[in-house]
Image: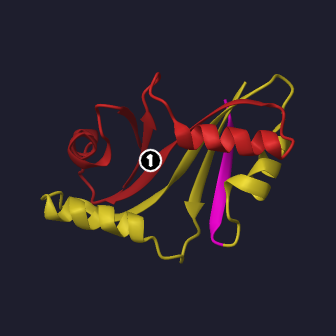
Chain colours: A yellow, B red
């Protein structure tokens, strides 16, 4: 089985990476973009029987910095 | 409107970042993980009327290095 984890900066936390992308897109003439947030996506291959709770524990302990980041788990 | 873009290394391209995460998870006792691939997720806020083709052009020109990366676009 597989899990996909999205790790994004929480709303209100400054995202300089996303801001740089937004600026670069604007400079290249892409004027339909009003905002950009960039985060990480982590695709996990798991053994059968792993649960969403296992993945949540990995997020809490390693994958996300929960002070400034939030995560979403999708089992696929 | 919003678009979410996933940028992942193509299959077969070595992913040292994912490999480091896999190793760290293993060292922490998470033995249900057999593989990890890490990529980027970019959330775009777009003006009404922007199309998937616009986003694809952004991916080709800036967001992804199409030599080694593939991208997926999701309009939401």
Position of A53 relative to A69 (above/below): above
Magenta span: predominant SS is strand
Q: Give A48 or B43, whichever is nearer the viewer.
A: A48
Position of residue B55 relative to residue B10, above or below, is below
Label 1 residue SS = loop
Of the 4 image quadrants, the one containing the N terminus of chain B is bottom left
Q: Note whether residue A34 is visible.
A: no
- Taking the image as drawn, is residue A67 in sight? yes
Q: What is the crowding at mark 1: few (fewer than 14 residues within 10 Å), some, or many (at least 20)?
A: few
In screen coordinates, is B7 left or right of B66? right
The residue range painted magenta reads A68-76
At which x and y percent is residue A23? 25, 67
The foreground one among B74 and B48 is: B74
Residue A74 colored in magenta in the image: yes
Give the percent coordinates (x, y) of residue B28. 83, 47
Residue labelled with disc 1: B76
Q: Position of residue B3 (x, y in %)?
A: 39, 49
Residue at left 35%, top 69%?
Answer: A19
* Residue at the outermost left position: A29
Q: Residue at the spot x=69%, y=38% of the render?
A: B22
């Amino acid at each position: 089985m597989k899990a996909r984890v999205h790790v994004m900066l929480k709303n209100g936390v400054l995202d300089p990476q996303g801001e740089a992308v937004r600026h670069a897109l604007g400079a290249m003439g892409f004027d339909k973009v009003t905002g950009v947030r960039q985060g990480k996506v982590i695709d996990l291959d798991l053994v059968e029987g792993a649960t969403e709770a296992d993945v949540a524990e990995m997020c809490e302990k390693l994958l996300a910095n929960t002070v400034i980041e939030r995560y979403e788990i999708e089992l696929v």
